[in-house]
Image (cartoon, rainbow, N blue to C red):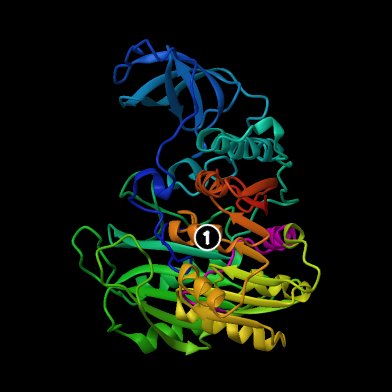
Amino acid sequence: MKNEQVNKGQQVKKSPQKNNGQPARKFSKGPANKDQQAPKLELKQTFPLTIKRLGINGEGVGYFKRQVVFVPGALPGEEIVAEATKVHPKFAEAKIKKIRKHSEHRIKPLCPVYDQCGGCQLQHLRYDQQLNEKRDIVIQALERHTRLKIEQLEIRPTIGMENPWGYRNKSQFQVGEKDGKVLAGLYGLNSHNLINIEQCAVQHPATTKATEVVKGILQDLKIPIYNEKKHKGLVRTIVARTGVQTGELQIVLITAKKKLPKKDLIIAEIKKRLPEVNSIVQNVNGEKTSVIFGSETATLEGSDFIQETLGDLQFELSARTFFQLNPEQTVKLYNEAKAAARLTGREKLVDAYCGVGTIGLWMADQAGEVRGMDLIPESIEDARKNALKHDVSYARFYVGKAEELLPKWLEEGWRPDVIVVDPPRTGCDDEFLKTVLKIKPKTFVYVSCNPSTLAKDIQTLGGKYKVEYIQPVDMFPHTSQIESVTRLVLK
């Protein structure tokens, strides 16, 4: 999954934030007459509702007397009895009291707590239909934030997975304590309630096992657990990342303080119970914040990084570096981005928001020169190592902002032919987009993890760039999130 920070290397908690880190509540135009005031629903009022489509957060969307209503767990085509749980001036939220007419696509969810932890929103929807609905979510965003004529756009069918389970190569589980028992999991949707997760259907089994083992070690050694409300204790988060292709495993303990009691015992027990571990790291975050990683990182045992393979490329992944969570779909996503760039071997390519250089290096065999940038020094260091490892001498990576580096390069006589971006959920920086409009690369490839910010950025670029097509790719089955690759060309 992706994050709210300007830099993708900073991972953000899935916790007590409104809408669980999802975009602010938006909705399509309803059937209301703008000159008429919609009668307000009352709290706890029950009412019939027909679900028209899925919202961007995966809830069912319907209209009751011209008022838009969001209902978690409801599916398009269903007729339900709803109960209002929140009433806002422009919309209402409700829960299902009864389903009078079930969707033909509704199935029994695999996970018993999927509707509590906030990690998955769509396990009750058949997977082939998830792909259809996610394409519609992209369309909704374009309708809401652009002036494009949707019927004239090529929005391709969503690319899915053959086996949409156990795909996440990294888990970030918050740690808590209840009745003397150490818990690890995710905060419930819009709450501070920690849902203990012992098995997760979308996590890679290696990360699930690792988290459970480390949780047991903390319990056995009586290591102080961080209390978010009191701002006391030590261990805040257990991060486990596996190289799906290499089998390497990294454990990161995120602590509120640098001093880690019984450090040697913790390391010894992790190595004993998880002999497959290659890297044990401590990250210190003493701030009152929802951001998971702090700025101070130290390797306690083993390597500073683990390695992962995508296609013919191998990447070194440090604890704080961003890397896609679904390697199988990442290959499909990057291949789509490469196809959208339409490189001939001569082009100057910029990989903005480059992380560890994955997209730039993926395209390098068809480019004349590659330059990438990112704000996190560790990411750029890894990107440089990755380029050196693969003998891509014409790929260079820089610490800094694209909106500062690109004008400097232009003054030096270097102008990119193609820019590819893979920004965080917040989308591209406004100054960066202004820079793109000044520099005018012939092709702009936008890899997006948020349809709303994609649509807004397309609208910003719309004066000079035309959307040739959008290709949705399902990186996170059973969630409402959808990635896409958009090819924009200079008019």
Q: Residue at (58%, 21%) from the top-left corner?
A: 78
Who is closer to the viewer here, 391 or 346?
346
Is 219 placed left or right of 208 in the picture?
A: left
Horizontal and vertical percent position of residue 268: 45, 87
330 drawn magenta: yes
Please tell me in which quadrant of the rendered image residue 324 appears: bottom right
Q: Residue at (60%, 44%) from the top-left corner?
A: 110
Residue 276 in sight here: no
Who is closer to the viewer here, 258 or 4?
4
Residue wearing tag 1: 423
* Rendered position, 252 above or below 163: below
Who is closer to the viewer here, 449 or 60?
449
Q: Amino acid at mark 1?
A: Pro
Q: Residue at (43%, 67%) from the top-left corner?
A: 10
* Rendered position, 179 above or below 252: above
| Element on which disc 1 rests | loop
* Rendered position, 9 above or below 5: below
Who is closer to the viewer here, 194 or 485?
485
Write the start and end of the magenta stretch as one range.
317-337
8 drawn magenta: no
Horizontal and vertical percent position of residue 347: 73, 71
**Mark 1 closeness class: few <14, some 14–19, many ≥20 residues within 10 Å:** many
